[in-house]
Image: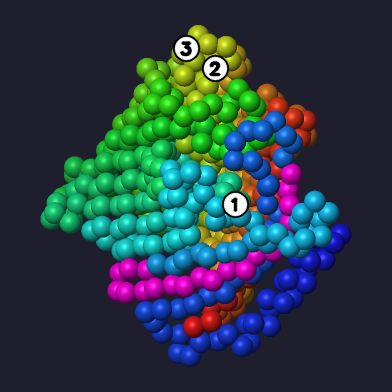
Amino acid sequence: MKKAFILVVSALLVMPFSVFAQSEGGERSFFSLGLGFGIEGLYNGEYTPTGTESKTLLYQSLGLHPQFRAENFDMALDLVARFRFDGGDNEDEFELRDEDWRTHGAWEILNLYLPKIRFARYGTKGDPIAVRLADIDGISYGNGFIVSSYTNTLFQPENRILGAVIDIDGSIVDIPYFGIEAFTANAARCDLAAGRLYVHPLAGFDLSILKGFEIGGTFAMDRNPYYFADRYAMYNSFLATPWSDETALHIYGLDFSVPLLTDPAFGLTLFGDRVSQNSRVGWMAGASGRVANAVIWEGQFRILDDGFIPEYFDASYDLYRPEKYAVYDSGSSGAGVAESCYAYLGALGLSLFEDKLVFKVVSEGPVWSAENRLYSWRGILELKEGLIPYFSCDILYDKKNMANFDDFAAWKQDSLLRARFHYHTGPVVLSLAYILRYMPSDFEKDRQILMGIEGRIRLH
């Protein structure tokens, strides 16, 4: 009750600033300064596994957010201090959260201080070259059979990592028929990264089917699948293993897509993939489209070898990195390896009001029962600013390892729920975030629930 009261009071304190913080003219200046404050429930974990149960503590936060702009370049810093007044042995002392500023050795300096950059970007996608340092929130490559809606924000706010994304268009060398896209989830370590080269070999033709034909090749790797397992005490001990070169994984594949119908109201695209994953192969063919400018759909048919994991780098990948690696590294006959099978993916949703309101449901799994092949279900809701004045939100629910439909009753098990709500008015943004994340655990408590509220105000 006390926590809920503090959250409400904080929201009321933020609202009046919208009256006094208005800028003149609204033109972009070289420098602007923002002030942020809020309340966050953070996991208070040890840097290495300790065998103790996880605990969530309530912190207040105060931050400065300077921003710099110059033509195609834009950069903002995130200088935040988190503190609480119920620290110490008697829970009555002021305590600064030193995990935000204290390093654990020389190798961790970049890992700790690089995320003080909120974002830095040069150019935008579609320019000859675009580079961005920021959170990665739902990135997909090709048809998504390797990288599908990957995000690196699942352990925020207590453990933020800064991603890097680069897009290069062939026009940079006067050859507008190819492009390169690449990202790394953690710019300080470059441990998880992917890149894709794509070409439009028939782009010179006027016919849309030929002009839009695309062939691509993707390479992805994770050099340290235990990155978060080594930082959270509640992970299963057998999943917390020191990093070594032998734990690296590599996945690569080829893809194609052909747009048969390109009308905004009625679209139809055919596509396919072949992916290699530690000598195991997965094939996929599918189609996606749009009906009456509102209904969006997708269907895939898959042929999977023993142990092959489709959409390896998906929306909840960072939670399951060590579990997926155990399957990747086990070979085709290890314990728990999924049986080869025919599988499917089906998606259906609505996209309304010029894509300002999007709702989509995704289901995937084996066509018929196969050993260790389970079902997954994902629901997505996105409401962009403008449809409802001053308000936007996005919600993701991702449930894994379902043996049958009855498993929905245990909706917290093997699941991720993330909801973010934003109130925008002038230079003020008020945000409320909720996250429930399941992690394989040695303890009875195998999930974390975190909440936070934050206000940001542009002072100049």
Taking the spot 43% from the left edge, 26% from the top edge, the residue there is 244
Q: Is 406 left or right of 238, judged from the image as shown?
A: right
Nearer the observer, 401 or 289: 401
Mark seen at residue 338? 2
Q: Position of residue 43 (x, y in %)?
A: 68, 47
Most common SS among magenta residues: strand
Q: Are marks 2 and 3 in contact (CB under 8 Å)?
A: no
Residue holding disc 1: 99
Q: If you read the primary sequence from the N terminus, does the residue marked by circle 2 or circle 3 appear first?
A: 3
Residue 441 visible, this orientation: yes
Residue 67: in magenta span: yes
Q: Secondary structure at mark 3?
A: loop
Q: Of discs 2 and 1, which sits in the foreground?
A: 1
Q: Of discs 1 and 3, which sits in the foreground?
A: 1
Nearer the observer, 345 or 450: 450
What span is colored magenta in the figure? 55-74
Q: Secondary structure at mark 2?
A: loop
Residue holding disc 3: 332
Badge 3 density bin: few <14, some 14–19, many ≥20, Cα 10 Å: many
Distance in Å between CA atoms under marks 2 and 3: 8 Å
Examine the image and state in which quarter residue 60 appears: bottom right
Examine the image and state in which quarter residue 352 appears: bottom right
Taking the spot 58% from the left edge, 15% from the top edge, the residue there is 336
Q: Position of residue 449 (x, y in %)?
A: 72, 47
Residue 210 visible, this orientation: no
Amino acid type assigned to the residue bearing label 2 in the image: Ala
Q: Secondary structure at mark 1?
A: helix
Number of numbered discs present? Answer: 3
